[in-house]
Image: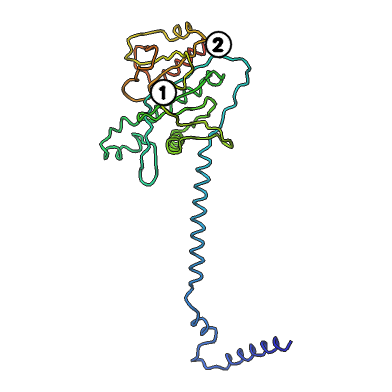
Amino acid sequence: MGRPYAVKGRKKKRKLDDGGASSHEPPVAAKEAEELPPPQPEQEEGGEREGDEEKGKEEEDEAAAEVADGLPVVPRPVDGKRRPGAIFVLERACLEVGKVGKTMQILNSDDHANYLRKQNRNPADYRPDIIHQALLAIFDSPLTKAGRLQAVYVRTEKGVLFEIKPHVRMPRTFKRFCGLMSQLLQKLSITAVGKREKLLNVIKNPVTRYLPVGARKIGLSYSAEKSVNLFDYVAKSSDDEPLVFVVGAMAHGKIDKEYSDDYIQICNYPLSAACCLNRICSALEQKWKIQ
């Protein structure tokens, strides 16, 4: 008990000394402030705070990337019957990843025209919007919603082949689609939200190894010599024979017909990939009475 009283007594003495000191001498509090070292600890704390903020941003980016990795799944129709379906192969899709600034992006003629010209490339050849519209035409069709789509295979201009499951919900916006394709070509697979199921997966060439045995492979091109009425052509096909439609997803040129059993023209005018696929889906829906 004696020690605390001694401390209190000393404090009182110091206060009395301060009051009686000359006005020329600085107060004790000012002296103590002058003797204090530079505020290094505060700077270190500030540095720690900045580091924490940077870590927080990195964690947010990682979380956003994890969310972006997952794709929603469309509910599958439950039907015990085995029904015929269609398979689509989209050839020569323009999906190429390039490093623009500090990020890897899918190159397109609108956003990266200057970048492509500096590398002596033609910006008109970089049209990932064509494959985006083509995939939306397939996955938005009543054919797919009725569960008659078996598989979709896409082969890029560089020869990369990947498979898309029939129950994928494709991104609606072009920017989100490009982000998804960029992740796919770098990580080689995209999983479902909250599941380990691979909805998009890069696979080995050639595509013929994944097609059903006895499937009829039909190539479509404006330059084909054989012109047919697509609705009559599809109506005459057998349900026991799986149909594989090979369609080009590029701005110019034609598909390779080396593995096609039949090479046909369905219109007297050049059609976009999305328009061509809409016609195919409509013909199959009429054949299988999908309304």
Displayed quadrant of residue 254: top left
Chain-order first, disc 2 or disc 1: 1
Question: Mark 1 packing: few (<14 Cα in 10 Å), some, or many (20+)?
Answer: many
Q: Residue at x 48, y 72 (%)?
A: 40
Per the image, label 1 sits on a secondary structure element best described as strand
Per the image, label 2 sits on a secondary structure element best described as loop
| Relative to 247, residue 234 above or below | above
Q: Which mark is residue 132?
A: none
| Relative to 49, residue 232 above or below | above
The kind of residue tagged 2 is Lys
Percent x, y of residue 81: 61, 15
The kind of residue tagged 1 is Leu
Q: Residue at x 40, y 21 (%)?
A: 273
Q: Nearer the viewer, residue 115 or 212?
A: 212
Disc 2 target residue: 289
| Relative to 7, residue 159 above or below | above
Percent x, y of residue 28: 54, 86
Percent x, y of residue 249: 38, 24
- Decide if residue 249 is on the left or right side of residue 11: left
Q: Nearer the viewer, mark 2 or mark 1?
A: 1
| Relative to 172, residue 102 above or below | below
Q: Nearer the viewer, residue 270 or 211?
A: 211
Percent x, y of residue 142: 53, 19
Q: Which mark is residue 90?
A: 1
What is the quadrant of the N terminus in the image?
A: bottom right
- Decide if residue 85 is on the left or right side of residue 80: left
Q: Residue at x 53, y 83 (%)?
A: 32
How far separated are the C-alphas under marks 2 and 1?
25 Å
- Decide if residue 125 is on the left or right side of residue 231: left
Question: Mark 2 packing: few (<14 Cα in 10 Å), some, or many (20+)?
Answer: few
